[in-house]
Image: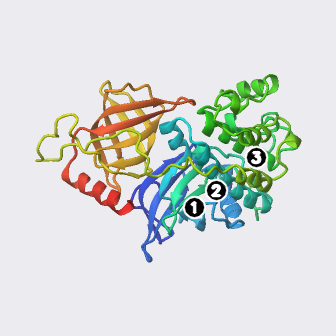
């Protein structure tokens, strides 16, 4: 079912894999009749027999179908394949994840932090109004995109762990309050304690952690479920001001209140948090979140092309947001999986969990834009940014590229920019 070229429900042809989690994978696909590009979520083959995994996809479809908001990824269709597997069709987002931005920049400006998280708070207000709880708010599920009017917008995605009040017509009971689901660093105390009072304020807590991370470059408590629980129970809630003095007191107070250990001490609703954030927007300090270039990457030599210019005379290659899964292979034969954030004619920006040093030579395997063809290109690690959660950002410079791949990347970058 996950093979590129597979046609889903007689309408959607899979072009390339965009992302992958523990239960499902998301593909860029094309509607055969309209030609529209969409995102299709499918269960991984090894999860196809899991009744709970199947129900999670359907639960996500019901939850997204019950809420329409500019800050929430739009669901377009859902159903089951010819062999009975559920699928979900969503709008295809073109942009960067907040996780990728933080990996590259380490932290955001005050203006950018308020801009992004206010969008998320507004989206959460719509989710909560539909009697649902997201339960997995984190930078990896927040995307900065450009809408049809070319304006920057923020979207909350991945409702795979949503708890919805919309009843399922039939099927297994999903894991609820008695099981740990989510990402430990962004989980509220009552979630980790498996208390019965888990409600919308767990999303407010997670957004508070996200604000703290955007401003300081780290999460307040890091580790496994048990390690984070112990820290929450024994350590005071950290304050942004203790790590960054240029943040306005009002914004520090918002993060501190949202991260309160007890739900009753947090904002009573996401709308209240959004209103508080709206009062913190400064006049200056905004950056271009989608066109940010962390490190210049020169274009590589193409087949039959002259050698690159001497160091100091190389031209910068324009980069465009591009999400796809990648596989990295070192000269020693070690392989690591990751995903890209953007691409240029000169290289690709990858997030992965791998101990690779600057200057290392590495082969990167990924799906090309436009065609979806899988290629493996020899590359060199130009820069490395280490992050928490055992993740690193890698700026890979292509050492060589064939004419066909180079043309497709150029066409994609030109079209996006």
**Residue located 76% across and 46% down the image:** 204
**On screen, 1 above or below 354?**
below
Q: Nearer the viewer, residue 319 or 128?
A: 319
- Is tag 2's residue or tag 1's residue first in the polypeptide sequence? 2
List the residue tagged with mark 3.
Answer: 204
Relative side of 233 to 300, left or right: right
The tag on residue 57 is 2
User: Residue 337's x, y, as percent?
Assistant: 44, 37
List the residue tagged with mark 1.
Answer: 87
**Residue located 69% across and 27% down the image:** 242
Q: Are marks 2 and 3 in contact (CB under 8 Å)?
A: no
**On screen, 317 above or below 145?**
above
Q: Secondary structure at mark 1?
A: strand
Q: Nearer the viewer, mark 2 or mark 3?
A: 3
Q: Nearer the viewer, mark 1 or mark 3?
A: 3
Q: Are marks 2 and 1 in contact (CB under 8 Å)?
A: yes
Relative side of 279 to 298, left or right: right
The tag on residue 166 is none
Q: Secondary structure at mark 3?
A: helix
**Residue located 23% across and 38% down the image:** 399
**On screen, 329 above or below 27?**
above
Q: Quadrant of residue 69?
A: bottom right
């Amino acid at each position: 079912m996950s093979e590129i070229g597979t046609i889903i429900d007689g309408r959607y042809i899979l072009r390339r894999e965009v992302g992958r989690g523990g239960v499902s994978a998301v593909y860029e696909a094309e509607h055969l009749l309209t030609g529209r590009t969409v995102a299709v979520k499918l269960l991984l083959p090894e999860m196809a027999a899991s009744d709970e995994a199947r129900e999670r996809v359907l639960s996500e479809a019901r939850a997204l179908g019950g809420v329409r908001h500019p800050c929430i990824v739009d669901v377009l269709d859902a159903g089951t394949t010819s062999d009975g597997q559920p699928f979900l069709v969503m709008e295809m987002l073109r942009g960067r994840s907040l996780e990728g931005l933080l990996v590259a920049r380490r932290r955001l400006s005050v203006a950018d932090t308020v801009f992004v998280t206010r969008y998320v708070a507004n989206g959460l207000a719509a989710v909560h109004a539909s009697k649902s709880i997201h339960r997995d708010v984190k930078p990896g599920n927040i995307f900065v995109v450009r809408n049809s009017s070319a304006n920057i917008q923020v979207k909350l995605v991945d409702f795979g762990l949503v708890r919805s009040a919309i009843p399922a017509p039939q099927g297994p009971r999903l894991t609820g309050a008695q099981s740990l689901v989510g990402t430990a660093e962004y989980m509220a105390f009552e979630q980790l304690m498996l208390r019965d009072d888990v409600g919308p304020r767990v999303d407010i807590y997670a957004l508070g952690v996200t604000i703290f991370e955007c401003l300081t470059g780290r999460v307040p408590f890091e580790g496994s479920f048990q390690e984070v629980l112990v820290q929450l129970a024994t350590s005071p809630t950290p304050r942004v001001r203790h790590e960054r003095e240029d943040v306005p007191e009002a914004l520090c107070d918002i993060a501190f209140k949202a991260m309160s250990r007890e739900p009753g001490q947090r904002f009573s609703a996401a709308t209240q948090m959004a209103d508080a954030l709206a009062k913190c927007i400064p006049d200056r300090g905004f950056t271009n979140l989608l066109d940010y270039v962390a490190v210049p990457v020169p274009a590589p030599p193409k087949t039959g092309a002259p050698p690159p210019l001497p160091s100091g005379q190389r031209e910068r290659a324009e980069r465009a947001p591009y999400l796809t899964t990648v596989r990295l292979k070192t000269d020693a034969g070690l392989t690591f999986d990751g995903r890209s954030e953007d691409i240029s004619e000169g290289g690709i920006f990858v997030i992965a969990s791998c101990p690779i040093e600057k200057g290392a030579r590495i082969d990167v395997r990924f799906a090309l834009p436009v065609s979806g063809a899988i290629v493996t290109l020899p590359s060199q690690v130009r820069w490395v940014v280490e992050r928490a959660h055992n993740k690193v950002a890698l700026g890979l410079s292509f050492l060589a590229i064939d004419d066909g791949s180079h043309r497709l990347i150029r066409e994609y970058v030109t079209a996006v920019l």
